[in-house]
Amino acid sequence: MSPTVEGPTHASAPDAPTAMSAPAATSSLIAAAYGYCEAVTGSQARNFAYGIRLLPADKRQAMSALYAFSRRVDDIGDGTLPHEVKLTRLEETRTLLGRIRAEEIDEDDTDPVAVALAHASRRFPIPLEGLDELIDGVLMDVRGETYETWDDLKVYCRCVAGAIGRLSLGVFGTAGSGAHDAARAGEYADTLGLALQLTNILRDVREDAGNGRTYLPAEDLAKFGCSEGFRSERMPHGSDFTGLVHHEVRRARALFVEGYRLLPLLDRRSGACVAAMAGIYRRLLDRIEREPQAVLRGRVSLPPHEKAYVAVRGLSGLDARTIARQSTKRRL
């Protein structure tokens, strides 16, 4: 359930970001591998793709490679394979990651995702151990783990989303910041990942319930009389589903406030990418807050024109400048 590992949507094709050609410096085999990853990203992750289209080609390609590998891991966890087969496939994927880390993947390898990710990890200082954490998080899903408290759920969220934030930071890098703030960039990226993931969890409560999964902390469900779960549009008499949603929305907003402090530490286009992706999820959170019952009827989403507006706002640097001013005020 990583925010960068979204399921396919049914938006019309003309609104989807298109893959860009690879820089001439890469071989045709590597270019083809990146092209495959960009196609996967464009078809499977609309929100993510809207963000990374703002990046220069080399960073966009690297982010697509990270997405395609993460998508593979997530698909194993969410698929219909028997339990033991899922465990085996996840360990095989971890072994492949080890080969990528050991630089054992050749350009003519038959796995385009491995080829692209191996090349990207040579281009950028990507902390590939974050993908090990993602695998650990998906293993939690396969084993059917539930979470008693927010602190318990944070462990899962850091694996499947915080790790993606830190991996992405390896591609983005930091620019124009002091040593202290730059050192905290990883922390901010991790926290922003938690904000995105909690928004994901709220958006998908009905879908996850249909798959036999409940992510929200058991103590929160009990507090608001929602322990029976979300398999129906109708909640039990006496439950306070709206109160539960507003409680989690407040938690997510606090995480966004802290995580957005990453923006001023990034270069303009990387900051625009993050602002676009995070901005889409913040708007989703607004919609969920306004109409909590909507998530019991189906997945809440933004129309393409609204996503485009968020992307333009991110590219303008408005969000980054606003956060920079707020951060300065806090230090004064």
Image (cartoon, grey):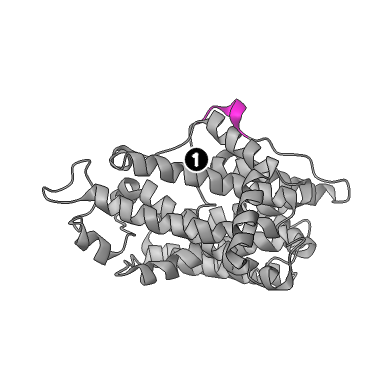
Q: Is residue 73 magenta?
A: no
Give the residue at mark 1.
8
- 10 Å crowding of disc 1: few (<14), some (14-19), many (20+): few
The image shows residue 169, relative to residue 322, as above or below, that is below
Furthest-right residue in this view? 25
How far from the left and from the top, in percent, is residue 196?
49, 54
- Left or right: 280 in relation to 221: right
Decide if residue 281 is in sight here.
yes
Residue 180: x and y in percent read 68, 73
Task: Examine the rendering and report whether any part of residue 79 can be seen.
Answer: no
In depth, the one of 219 and 321 nearer the eye is 321
Q: Which residue is drawn at 53% across and 61% down?
A: 258
Quick check: 121 left or right of 46? Answer: right
Q: Where is residue 140 in the image (x, y as percent from the top left)?
A: 40, 67
Picture residue at 48% right of the left edge, 32% below the top: 10
Viewer-proximal residue, 28 or 189?
Answer: 189
Task: Please identify the quadrant where the C terminus is shown.
Answer: bottom right
Q: Which residue is drawn at 27% across and 54% down?
A: 244
Q: Position of residue 22 (x, y in %)?
A: 80, 44
Q: Give the range drawn in magenta.
A: 11-16
205 is higher (above) or lower (below) than 173: above
